[in-house]
Image: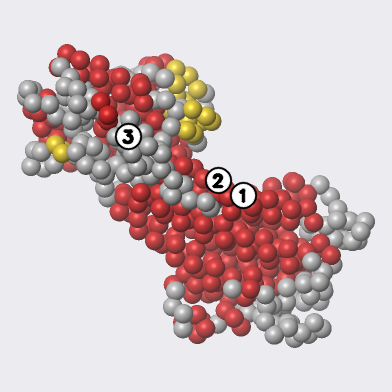
Amino acid sequence: MTASDVLAVARGGARVQLSEEAVAALGAAREIVDALAAKPEPVYGVSTGFGALATRHISPELRAQLQRNIVRSHAAGMGPRVERDVVRALMFLRLKTVCSGHTGVRPEVAQTMADLLNAGITPVVHEYGSLGCSGDLAPLSHCALTLMGEGDAEGPDGVVRPAAELLAAHGIQPVELREKEGLALLNGTDGMLGMLIMALADLDTLYRSADVTAALSLEALLGTDKVLAPELHAIRPHPGQAASAANMAAVLKGSGLTGHHQDDAPRVQDAYSVRCAPQVAGAGRDTVAHARLVADRELASAVDNPVVLPDGRVESNGNFHGAPVAYVLDFLAIAVADLGSIAERRTDRLLDKNRSHGLPPFLADDAGVDSGLMIAQYTQAALVSELKRLAVPASADSIPSSAMQEDHVSMGWSAARKLRTAVDNLTRVLAVELYAATRAIELREGLMPAPATRAVIDALREAGVQGPGPDRFLAPDLAAADAFVRDGRLLAAVETVTGTLQ
């Protein structure tokens, strides 16, 4: 499975089909579990209780009830509903592990999981309930509950109804769980991994967008593009830095605004927020690359406890611990906060008449009568302040659970949830910089912007985002700029001139 597969199912509604190999692997592993279930000796997850209750041997007549009970009792989430794409990613990733042949789940259970995805039935999952160890227990339990025809779920029409009604409406028979199956449906890092994969996809767009907004700010501030020369970045060979500098240089090619730093208000060097843009964005890009490596490894993993091994053993393990994923989720939140922070500093510089090299205060039409973009920067600053709070690592925390049996947890789900918010806010931060930089460039009368910049400004104005002028209701303009960045129109406009950015 690839990250593209996860995105196709989670966000694109792609259909899921079990391969012949998966069905064979499921059947072979199930035979092993059935053989162990028939033995008098207790086997964890097959004929025992769970967690701190693992010492109790469960008799055969109570095992189906045990599997139902673990799902019902673990479906204990609280708080707001989790987004549909997150739940679909979580379900699909759990199905991936189930189909690995290491879980002991019957083929018919896996097929029902695929049927739910294909029918567009999305279990109601809540914000709180996962400690990231043993995996995302409560979120996965709410999904397993829907498989059993219990709890609530959202239909393809977006309406939440009892799961039993939705399954019946789509001709899906609820599953009757057998030995090990309840546990196998709950024990995984699927929620945090799904959110990591989606964040990586979003950040791929946002880091390239940040190169564009940084280039526009450099241009608006009459900065020098000499700092983007590839030979300067070759002597500090971080790949992300080189890519970011190359993108900025491509955007600025042919600009009539760059290189004026020796004109009326001469300066030797541009400020760090302008001059060091490739270094900061580049470090974030390299962090994304590391996180993608971890995500790919986790995609290749079978996360369950206990696991069925090819030689017939069923062994307990700790592969459900979310530390590898949690760390990179937190690492990304730090990089996102710093990227937002440097973008906000460039915006503030554009609005300050003492540092903007000839631009009007706050880019106002009639400063004093008009406030210009003063409060747009306030909004951006509030977003950046929240980004800094969201950068505090969740994985540095641990809170013991299950009567001290699960005495060290990853908090990876929490790391994923806050990264999701951070990525959302970074988009807004870049939208404000875009809004300010394009207005500033248009105020540089008599100087011709780069062709790529002109393409951005034209596309932005066509999208309904207005240019310089007297004060107006700013929120609609900012919302339109946000959408322009979020849906990729910013990159599309630039790349009509530059070609595909790195």
Residue bearing mark 3: 404
Residue bearing mark 2: 421
In this view, the residue in front, 141 or 452, is 141
Which residue lies at the image location 46% right of the left edge and 80% below the top edge? 236
- 370 lies left or right of 82: right
Alpha-carbon distance for marks 2 and 3? 31 Å
Image marks 2 and 1: residues in contact by CB distance under 8 Å = yes
Q: Position of residue 244 (x, y in %)?
A: 52, 70
Whether residue 225 is visible, yes or no, is yes
Image marks 2 and 3: residues in contact by CB distance under 8 Å = no
Residue type highlighted by circle 3: Met
Say what secondary structure mark 1 lies in: helix
Which residue lies at the image location 50% right of the left edge and 85% below the top edge? 231
Q: Position of residue 319 (x, y in %)?
A: 26, 44
Alpha-carbon distance for marks 3 and 1? 34 Å
Residue bearing mark 1: 386
Name above or below for residue 52 compared with residue 223. Answer: above
Say what secondary structure mark 3 lies in: loop
Residue type highlighted by circle 2: Thr
Quarter of the rendering containing residue 470: bottom right
Pointer 2: residues within 10 angstroms few (<14), some, or many (20+)?
some
